[in-house]
Image (tube, rainbow, N blue to C red):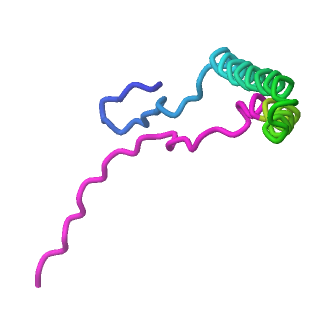
Amino acid sequence: MRKQSAGGSAEVFRITGARTGLQEDVRGRQRRYIISMSIRTASVILAVCLWNVERHVAIVALVLGAALPYIAVVIANAGRENAPSLPSTFVTAPTPPMIMPPRA
């Protein structure tokens, strides 16, 4: 970060667009993965319990349980590759208004 000089024309850096820390990012991805795997476990248990009662619901739950690991891994690994649209790096100094030419 730069300090403003006596003239007041120094560049000022923004930090509002900084990414989250690596540890916080990994923790969030682990949380999403655990939630997805919990839903998968519940859907497989639901498929086993409903197999002889409601076969259509059991098949849907089984398909969800089979497809969810791939989706969970893709979601969990989609972490830091693409940053959100960050603001510009520098705050531009306001330009003084332009003086109009004298009237004829």
Residue 78 magenta: yes
- Quadrant of the frame with the C terminus: bottom left
Splitting the image into 4 quarters, where does residue 83 fall? top right
Query: In which quadrant of the rendered view does residue 92 lie?
Result: top left
Horizontal and vertical percent position of residue 81: 73, 36
Is residue 35 shown above or below 9? above
Q: Where is residue 51 in the image (x, y as percent from the top left)?
A: 87, 30
Farthest residue, direction bottom: 104
Placement of 26 over or under 76, stated as above or below: above
Q: Give the side of residue 4 with respect to residue 85, left or right.
A: left
Residue ID at (41%, 41%): 91
Percent position of residue 97, x then y: 23, 59
Magenta segment boundaries in residue numbering: 75-104
Which residue is painted at 65% across and 21% down in the image?
28
Do we see residue 49 in this rendering?
yes
Q: Which residue lies furthest to the front in this view?
A: 53
> What residue is rendered at 48% in x and 29% in y?
15
Q: Is residue 4 left or right of residue 61?
A: left
Front in this rendered view, residue 65 or 86? 65
On the rendered structure, is 91 left or right of 25? left
In depth, the one of 69 and 13 nearer the eye is: 69
* SS assignment for the magenta stretch, majority: loop
Residue at (40, 35) in percent of width and height: 10
Q: Is residue 100 left or right of residue 1?
A: left
Q: Residue 50 colored magenta? A: no
- The answer to whether residue 68 is seen in the rendering is no
Q: How many labels does the image show?
A: 0
